[in-house]
Amino acid sequence: MIRLISFDLQGVVSDATFSDTFWLEELPKLYAKRHNVDVAVAKRSLGDMFKAMGKYDLRYYDDAYWGGS
């Protein structure tokens, strides 16, 4: 039985502007607020974490994981 089918709809359902705004602007703001750091520091920290995890780890794509970090 097939339980889940996942499609990469980047650019179909939403354009890159949506993703860029979320990952590059809003998520760093949330991280900065939760960790009481400057947004520039949050961007560097998240960038380092993204690289360390790698794009093949499913958590990489989980906005809830990053928002709760």
Image (cartoon, rainbow, N blue to C red):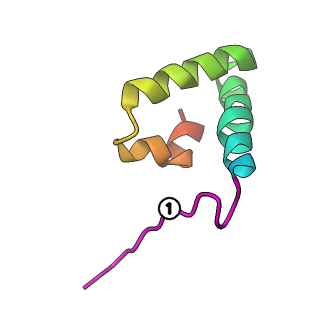
In depth, the one of 10 and 63 nearer the eye is 10
Q: Residue 8: x and y, percent? A: 50, 61
Residue matched to label 1: 8
Q: Which span is picked out in magenta?
A: 1-15
In depth, the one of 38 and 20 nearer the eye is 20
Most distant residue in the bottom direction:
1
Residue 51 image-quadrant placement? top left
| One can see residue 58 in this view | yes
Q: Residue at x 73, y 26 (%)?
A: 33
Q: Residue 26: x and y, percent? A: 73, 38
Q: Is residue 18 above or below residue 36?
A: below
Q: Residue at x 33, y 78 (%)?
A: 3
Most distant residue in the front direction:
11
In depth, the one of 32 and 13 nearer the eye is 13
Most distant residue in the left direction:
1
**Horizontal side of residue 54 vs 24, given as left or right:** left
Q: Is residue 12 above or below residue 68?
A: below
Q: How many marks?
A: 1
Q: Residue at x 47, y 67 (%)?
A: 7
Say what amino acid the circle numbered 1 marks: Asp
Q: Residue at x 71, y 56 (%)?
A: 15
Point out the image quarter for the N terminus. Answer: bottom left
Q: Secondary structure at mark 1?
A: loop
| Most frequent secondary structure within the magenta stretch | loop
Residue 22 image-quadrant placement? top right
Q: Residue 56: x and y, percent? A: 34, 42
**Badge 1: residue crowd in 10 Å (few <14, some 14–19, many ≥20):** few
| One can see residue 37 in this view | no
Q: Is residue 17 above or below residue 48?
A: below
Q: Is residue 37 above or below residue 18?
A: above
